[in-house]
Amino acid sequence: MKIAVSGKGGVGKTTIMALLAGELRRQGREVLVIDADPSPHMAQTLGIAGAGEVRPIAEMGKLLAERAGKSSGSPFYNLNPEVNDLLRDFMLEQDGLRLMILGAVQTAEGGCACPENHVLRKMLKKMLLTAKEVVLVDMEAGVEHLGRGTVAGADCLLIVVIPSKSGVRTALKIRQMAEDVGIPRIFFVGNLVQSAADQDFLSAELGEEPAAFFPDSAILRQTERAGQPVLALREGLEDAPRLLLEKILAA
């Protein structure tokens, strides 16, 4: 299964994904995490060492342009770039978790990340997984990745949303665009929830109850502020990671 995680900036999608990765590992699944956020910090959230030594795919500009079949003078992309060796060569592995970092445009007006996003899209579509394997993709905040069709190869999209009007507006827009690109399973995930009133607000504004509600956890905040990985954290989460995974697998 290939699961992408999206949402408005600052809603905690990276944290939710790390907690889901931990739950998947506890249940004996093999997990590959792809950090496709332009400001990648999934390695730190997962507690995987050595991320600074890995060359992100986005830095391989010439290679990516060649894989995508786009020359400097051509507006077209090759529809079938070879990506299998990228899975082998651009990966970190620790404690049964594998991490791949897409990387980012590093300078102002640095240009479009189209070649690397094209390769990511094809990678997701071409991956053949066993029943025990799960790919988690941490997308950039907002809706641009859906406009590029980057997550078109995902089986499931989790839209993380906090109890705010602006958060709900972005979440609903993401869902509409996800439906347009044909993602078969889409779930809202409530985060930073403090009360039953927050849960009721999200359910009413979204038009459906989120698949899970993650609490505004003081323990989680302390863990993150201390720079510690949240992967193994279970206290103070009200069993939300397990409940979310149950909903995903049952759909």
Image (tube, rainbow, N blue to C red):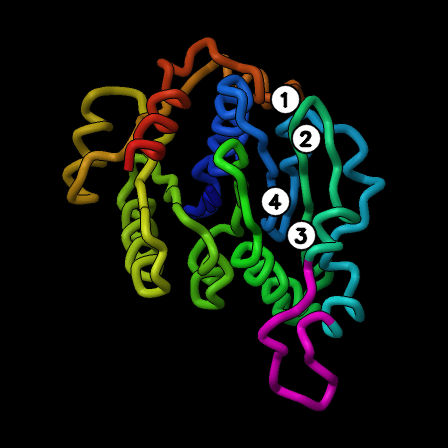
Q: Residues within 10 Å of mark 1 (few under 14, many from 20)?
A: many
Disc 2 versus disc 4: nearer the observer: 4
The CA span between labels 3 and 2 is 15 Å
Query: Cβ–Cβ below 8 Å for labels 3 and 4?
Result: yes
Tell me how far mark 3 sits from mark 4, CA to CA. 7 Å
Give the spatial CA distance, label 2 vs label 4.
Answer: 13 Å
- Mark 3 or mark 4: whose residue is earlier in sequence: 4
- Observer-nearest of 131 and 236: 131
Q: Is residue 2 left or right of residue 223?
A: left
- The label nearer to you, 1 versus 3, is 3
- Residue at the location (73% across, 73% down)? 65
Name the mark on residue 69. Answer: none
Disc number at residue 44?
A: 2
- Which residue is tagged 4? 34
**Residue farthest along the bottom direction in this orientation:** 73
Q: Residue at x 19, y 34 (%)?
A: 201
Residue designated by label 1: 229
Find out whether the residues at labels 1 and 2 contact each other: C-beta distance under 8 Å.
Answer: yes
Residue 48 x/y as whole percent: 72, 28
Amino acid under disc 1: Pro
* CA–CA distance in space, label 1 to label 4: 17 Å
Check if residue 70 falls in the magenta segment.
yes
Indicate the amino acid at tag 4.
Answer: Ile
